[in-house]
Image: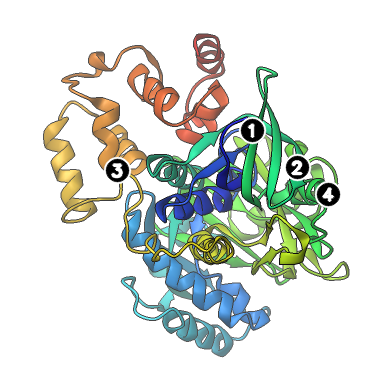
Amino acid sequence: MSKIVDVFIIGGGINGAGIARDAAGRGLSVILCEQGDLAGATSSASTKMVHGGLRYLEYYEFGLVREALAERERLLRIAPHLVTPLRLILPHNANMRPAMMIRAGLWLYDRLGGRSSLPRSGGLRLGQCVEAQTLAQPRGRAFAYSDARADDARLVVANALDAAEHGAKIHTRTKVTGCVREGDHWIISAKNSAGKTRTWRTRLLVNAAGPWVDAMDKCTKAKAVSHMRLVKGSHIILPTLFDGPRGFLFQNDDRRVLFALPYQGEFTLFGTTDTPYEGDPYGAKLDEKERDYLLDAVNRFFAKATTREDIIWSYSGVRALFGDEEMDASKLSREYHLELSDKSAGAPVLTVLGGKITIFRALAEKAVDQLAERLGHDAPHWTGTTALPGGDMEGGLKAFETKITAQYPFLPEPMRQRLIHAYGTRITRVLGTANSLSDLGVHFGADLYAAEVDYLKAQEWASCAEDVLWRRTKRGLFLTEAEKKAFSKAF
């Protein structure tokens, strides 16, 4: 058994990785165990946005929106490669919500989070928007407002990288199998994919297992999840439905909102659903009812008919939200709850419930505040002003793009942009001294080369083809079936 550590974290999603980063950077010794891949479940199944949550204003969740907008601004600064501005068009439907209500909501949305670097909202005419030309109703009144998009899985990996570089030990494909209190510490047992069992001692345990938080709650006997609800959100990826750089926020006829967003240069991401879920979260997939719901909405908003055969890919994620049984799943709050066990219970366990990707950093900071206080450890906040790995760009993103273009002139523009936004300043660790595409080694298809795959395996915990194709790079959308099979065999 290894020496005792300060904090042991169960769960390698955005909350677990964020807590690991913050805690390690404050000088605490940290171990994180994830039963699958980093961001292998919920945290790679988001709408790929960092946003304040405009629709939450309708439910009077002003505190949540304020915090999320402030965090959006911080993430734009500390991760400019992973989190980038996105302008959204909201076509007006007077039968859903009056224009005055939307104007008031957008006015508040522009101001709740404090000073913002993004343009404020305003009115527009759909007939003047290139994006609206393919809508079923391409004329009429609309509004435009600002938010941001993100690569959710890479955001998780960036936090894990920073945690590791501050001393944290990250163990993927390592499932916690036992948690036993022994005086003022925990004995944690876990088994890796090779079947080897390891045991650690820790002063404090963090249950950030996301949709598996209930199972870990029973393991630790914390009894902190009585109001947890599992909710599945599903998205579909379609061939591009519209031209232009902006996305859409639609008001559906059931009063829910749906996003249609430019995705990976060649596709449209459409979603999301909100449905109650039971069963193993790893088994979550787009079901027939969800598929039909999303396709019906696509065909309501866009002129060209879309069928199930047009769906290129779909993904589903299960969120552990905090709310009452009788509440509609779409109305459950994305607010988070941190439940720290009472001192009288012995060795502490902190249970993380709820949250959303936008506010992970604030959640982590508050969580580590509680951990540090319980451990008698005093260290200043740091994550809100320190760049995530790859985000340390002097002069900003545009200046960095110019620099990389000069350094690697042989890169095709789409590939250069993808690598810059995936790795930021760490692109040089991927490309090294390459002077041509052939210097990058085996070409697996699309713009995926051996140099990138080797980096992901050596530095970013990628241990199978799925980790690379669907989370680290999204190249699974571009490779042919034959290329994907060949890549899997070569991995």
Q: Earlier in the sequence, mark 3 or mark 4?
A: 4
Tell which circle, 2 or 1, labels the residue nearer the N-terminal end: 1
| Comparing labels 4 and 2, the label whose residue is closer to the camera | 2
Give the SS element for disc 1. Answer: loop
Q: Label 3 belongs to which residue?
A: 424
Residue under label 1: 36
Between label 3 and label 4, give the one nearer the viewer.
Answer: 4
The tag earlier along the polypeptide, 2 or 3, is 2
Which circle's residue, 4 or 2, is located before the other in the chain?
Answer: 2
Residue 427's quadrant in the figure? top left
Q: Position of residue 108 (x, y in %)?
A: 48, 85
The residue wearing badge 4 is 218
Q: Secondary structure at mark 2?
A: strand
**Please, what secondary structure does the residue beneath circle 4 have?**
helix
Q: Residues within 10 Å of mark 2 (few under 14, many from 20)?
A: many
Residue at image mark 2: 179
Residue visible at 68% across and 41% down? 307
**Mark-to-mark CA distance, 3 and 1:** 26 Å
Residue at image location 68% in from the left, 64% down from the top? 340
Discs 2/3, front: 2
> Where's residue 82, x and y in %?
38, 49
Instruction: Judge from the rendering whether residue 102 lies leftward or rightward of residue 287; answer left or right.
Output: left
What amino acid does circle 4 point to? Lys
| Amino acid type at image mark 2 | Cys
Image coordinates for residue 359, horizontal then vertical, percent? 52, 64
Labels 4 & 2 near each other (Cβ < 8 A): no
In the image, farthest residue toward the front: 183
